[in-house]
Structures are given as C-alpha cells and as structure tokens.
Amino acid sequence: MIEVKHLTKSFDGRKVLDDISTVFESGKTNLIIGRSGSGKTVMMKSIIGLIRPDEGEVLFNDRNILKMGKKELNELRREMGMLFQGSALFDSMTVMENVMFPLDMFSQMSVRERRRRADFCLERVNLSEAHDLYPSEISGGMMKRAAIARAIALNPRYLFCDEPNSGLDPKTAILIDELIHDITKEYNMTTVINTHDMNSVINIGEHIVFISEGVKEWQGTKDNVITSNNEALNDFIFANDLLRKAREFEDSQREG
C-alpha cells in the first residue's frame, strides 16, 4: 500500500500539485488520469522520489520515502518495478539480456538463477520465443511485454507504469492492460498507472484518481466513473471519447 498525504509541489511559483491525498492499495490497479499538463507525471515522480515535493508525505507501507537516506532509498527502489512509456529497452541487448539487466545489477543470484528467473518472467508474459531477438526485431506490443517482464524480474512489491499503452493499437493495448491487471493480482503488487486512455480506465480502473490543473478533482472506480457528476471529469471523458471516435473514423476511411 502507498499513502499520499497532502502532496504539494510548485515550479517557478506555479502550483503543479495542490494538497493531494489518496491511497493506492495492494493487489489493485490504481490509475492516475488527467490531461497532459494536469500534474499526473509530477505526482508519480514525487511518489517514487525523483521529485521532492514542497509539502506532504509519501508512505510505502508506513515508510516515508521523503525521510529516507540514500541507502534506505536504494533498498526501497529495489522493491519497485518500472514500465516506461517507450518501453526503454536497450537496443544493443537481446530481450533476454534486457530482462536479466536488473537481476545483474541488483540481485545476489548466480548466473544460472538469474537466467532461470528471466526465463520465468518471459514465459509469464508469453514471450519465450523472443529470447534471442533484439528490440528492433520485435513488434511494439512485444516490446511492452518484454518491458513488463523486466519490470517484474526482481519480484517487486510496487509497479509503476507510465502511459503503458502509448503507441499501441487498441487490440494490443487491451492485452497489455489485462496483463498488467493479472500480474498485479497474481503477485499482490501495488500498481500505479499514469494514463489518459479511457479504455484502460474502463477495463482495469479499480481505483482511479483524476487530477485537473494540479487538484484531485475526483476519485472512484471504473464502475462509477461514467456516472460521475464532476464537470471536469465529464469534460475529460467526453474529449477522450471524441478523439477515439475520430481515430476510428480515420481508420475506416483508410480501410475503405
């Protein structure tokens, strides 16, 4: 579980996060949603310790990341898995070598144990056949799955995903959503996802925090996001729906 308490952050006198409090529960897919520039990226970076907020607390199972020394912070980060927006695989490494990278860096396993763990993670994301391929030789969806395998290699307690569906077609995006959701349940991780994809919200949004101009405007679940009376949230949903329909129309025109 991660508790965020009164998180506040300003840049050059402009308040980017304004007194945000919420709880991200273990075993759930927790989503931070909002438009570009809403503050959701700053919030995630503050949670994982890349940005220091002006005020507030971030508690990882009652451990305040903002009060940790370097050694304690490094130990906590070994409990985190990260899925970056562009997958961030190393081009010069095979898929297997990419998944083994955090194990090589942070684990005390033997080479055989590290390879066995990487094998297991690749099998878990249905990517065993891509062992010896390089990122340039696989599809975008396969790259995302390889990145997920790398993110869970150290068996993290916390998983952070930044726009995991970016650049994917709708069908592949659904598969990635379902994979993240299933892994979260399977390993009882606290998963936090930054996204503006309404399909992800509807499919896997067990706990949703909507941020608008640095303010937490709404929180709830996928079951009540559509019926909310929050005007800012409804504007966000409507804008996303229009964009989706426009893309579907463009695709149908090209196919026709």
Image: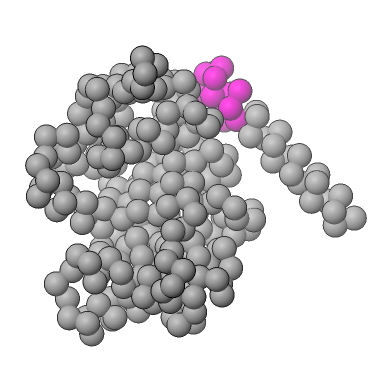
Residue 8 sits in which quadrant?
top left
Residue 236 drawn in magenta: yes
Residue 216 x/y as whole percent: 40, 22
Labels in figure, total:
0
What is the residue that sits farthest to the right in this orientation? 256
Q: Is residue 198 left or right of residue 193?
A: right
In the picture shown, does residue 205 fall above or below 182?
above
Quarter of the rendering occupied by the C terminus: bottom right
Residue placed at 29% from the left, 35% from the top? 51
Question: Residue pushed farthest bottom?
Answer: 112
Residue placed most toward the observer, 75 or 247: 75
Q: Return the residue nearer the eye: 184 or 54.
A: 54
Q: Is residue 86 magenta?
A: no
Answer above or below: position of 8 versus 251. Answer: above
Q: Which residues are magenta?
A: 226-237
Q: Considering only vertical position in the picture, is 226 above or below 249?
A: above
Q: Does residue 101 appear to the left or right of 141 in the view shown?
A: left
Report the quarter where the N terminus lies: top left
> Where residue 248 appears, x then y in whole percent?
76, 46
Residue under the point 36% across and 22% down: 11
Is residue 218 visible from the viewing direction of this image?
no
Q: How is the image coloured?
A: one colour
Using the image as rendered, state which of residue 88 and residue 252 is in the foreground. Answer: 88
Residue at figure coordinates x 41%, y 62% from the top left: 148
46 to the left or right of 69:
right
Give the quarter of the image for residue 184: bottom left
Q: Is residue 82 left or right of residue 250?
A: left
Quarter of image, res 226: top right
